[in-house]
């Protein structure tokens, strides 16, 4: 049985507990529906995490509809204050 956890340092950061999952390897992709705060509309920069990308699945094809944020995006609006 496996626990599926998120990437932040919070004890309640679980997607699933004690689930039977197929064997995986590094680089495998897991689809999680209803991601809550990990979806874009609820995402934040807590712990300096980048906001997530968004993918759409349409007629069996996956396409990127919003790019993942990077650190430069996060500080762009604060940069003038950092130079003071």
Image (spheres, rainbow, N blue to C red):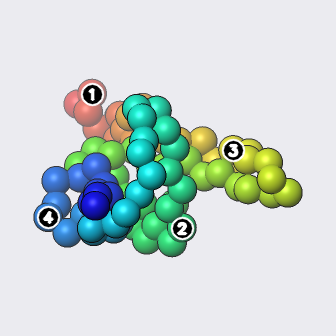
What is the spatial separation of the Cα atoms under label 2 and label 1, in whole angstroms?
Answer: 41 Å
Which residue occupies the foreground of this view, 44 or 63?
63
**Badge nearest the viewer, 1 or 4:** 4
- The residue at the point 33 percent across, 46 percent down is 49
Residue linked to disc 4: 11
Which residue is disc 1 drawn over? Answer: 83
In the image, residue 5 lies at what x, y percent? 29, 57
Q: Position of residue 81 (x, y in %)?
A: 28, 38
Q: Mark 3 points at which residue?
A: 64
Badge 2 is on which residue? 33
Q: Which of 41 and 20 is in front in this view?
A: 20
Q: Earlier in the sequence, mark 3 or mark 4?
A: 4
Which secondary structure, mark 3?
strand
Of pointers 2 and 3, the one earlier in the residue sequence:
2
Question: Quick one: which residue is furthest to the right in this view?
Answer: 59
Q: Quadrant of the N terminus?
A: bottom left
Q: How crowded is the residue under tag 3: few (<14 C-alpha within 10 Å), some, or many (20+)?
A: few
Give the CA distance from mark 2 to mark 3.
Answer: 16 Å
The location of residue 38, given as percent across then percent down, is: 42, 61
Q: Distance between the residues labelled 4 and 2?
A: 21 Å
Give residue 67's quadrant in the image: top right
Tell which of 20 and 31 is nearer to you.
Answer: 20
Could you tell me how far apart the alpha carbons at marks 1 and 4 are, in whole angstroms?
Answer: 36 Å
Viewer-nearest of labels 1 and 3?
3
């Amino acid at each position: 049985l496996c626990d599926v956890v998120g990437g932040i340092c919070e004890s309640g950061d679980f997607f699933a507990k004690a689930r039977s999952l197929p064997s995986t390897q590094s680089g495998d992709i897991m689809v999680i529906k209803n991601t809550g705060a990990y979806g874009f509309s609820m995402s934040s920069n807590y712990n300096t995490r980048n906001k997530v990308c968004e993918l759409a699945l349409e007629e069996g094809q996956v396409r990127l509809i919003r790019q993942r944020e990077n650190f430069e995006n996060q500080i762009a609006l604060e940069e003038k204050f950092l130079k003071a």
